[in-house]
Amino acid sequence: MKKVRGRRRQLRRFAQSSHLPVPWSLRQLHQDQYDYARPGLAPWYGSSFASNPPTRIRQEVFKALLATHTQWQCQLQDYAEPHYLAVWVMNSVFRESQVVAGVGSRREYYAGVFGLPDPAAPPLPPEYQAVPGAGQLRWTAYQHEVPVGHWEFDDAAEATQFLRRVRYRTVADAAGNPLYLIRLGRVWVGKAQ
């Protein structure tokens, strides 16, 4: 990958434009039953910088996520159907943080996508709590897990070698086969109070 030039200039440009909320359409939400907005971390998206940017950039992105949530919440006030609207803040892969809206079947899916809350998890990190508007949402911590099925490995030796390097828990899929839930970190879900 090519090195990004002009880091200070890029950071300044990002800070100036990152506070703008992401526009959306209720008609599109009704048609697809979901919508989401991720932070635009260009030109760093494919680099490790985007996975865990400096605190200042994370705070700017967090501000943009809160602004987007507020704008979408105002638009959803007159929406007749029950809906799901939340901000997801990922600590392990920050670029996956997003604002998510769902209606219909997607509402139930999003409400249960992370399973049960993690009672032992710490509260929202202080660098996010310091951002204006963070206190307007109720934050709940969950384990951020990604499912990996037994079919993704060529043989048992490959599965064993992979599972030695990661933290995981095993559950059974619908057919009774092992499904490995790889722990990536935590996700904080913020919903309106």
Image (tube, helix red, strand yellow):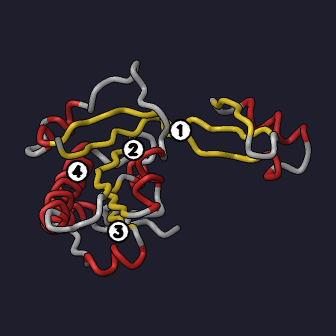
- Image: 9 above or below 193: below
Query: How many residues crowd around disc 2 within 10 Å: few (fewer than 14), some, or many (20 or more)?
Result: many
Query: How many residues crowd around disc 3 within 10 Å: few (fewer than 14), some, or many (20 or more)?
Result: few
Judged left or right of residue 84, residue 114 is right
Q: Residue at x 14, y 67 (%)?
A: 78
Task: State the image coordinates of residue 103 (x, y, percent, origin top left).
Answer: 36, 63
The mark lying in front, picked from 2 and 3, is 2
Q: Residue at x 34, y 48 (%)?
A: 88
Task: State the image coordinates of residue 67 (x, y, percent, origin top left).
Answer: 15, 59
Of all residues shown, which one is farthest toward the front? 80
Query: How many residues crowd around disc 4 within 10 Å: few (fewer than 14), some, or many (20 or more)?
Result: many
| Secondary element at image label 4 | helix
Q: Amino acid at mark 1?
A: Leu
- Asked where in the image residue 79 lies, by quadrant, the reply is bottom left
Question: How far is disc 1 from disc 2 in space, using C-alphas?
Answer: 9 Å
Of pointers 1 and 3, the one earlier in the residue sequence: 3
On the question of residue 9 being in view, the answer is no
Q: Which residue is labeled 4 in the image?
A: 62
| Secondary element at image label 3 | loop
Badge number at residue 42: 3
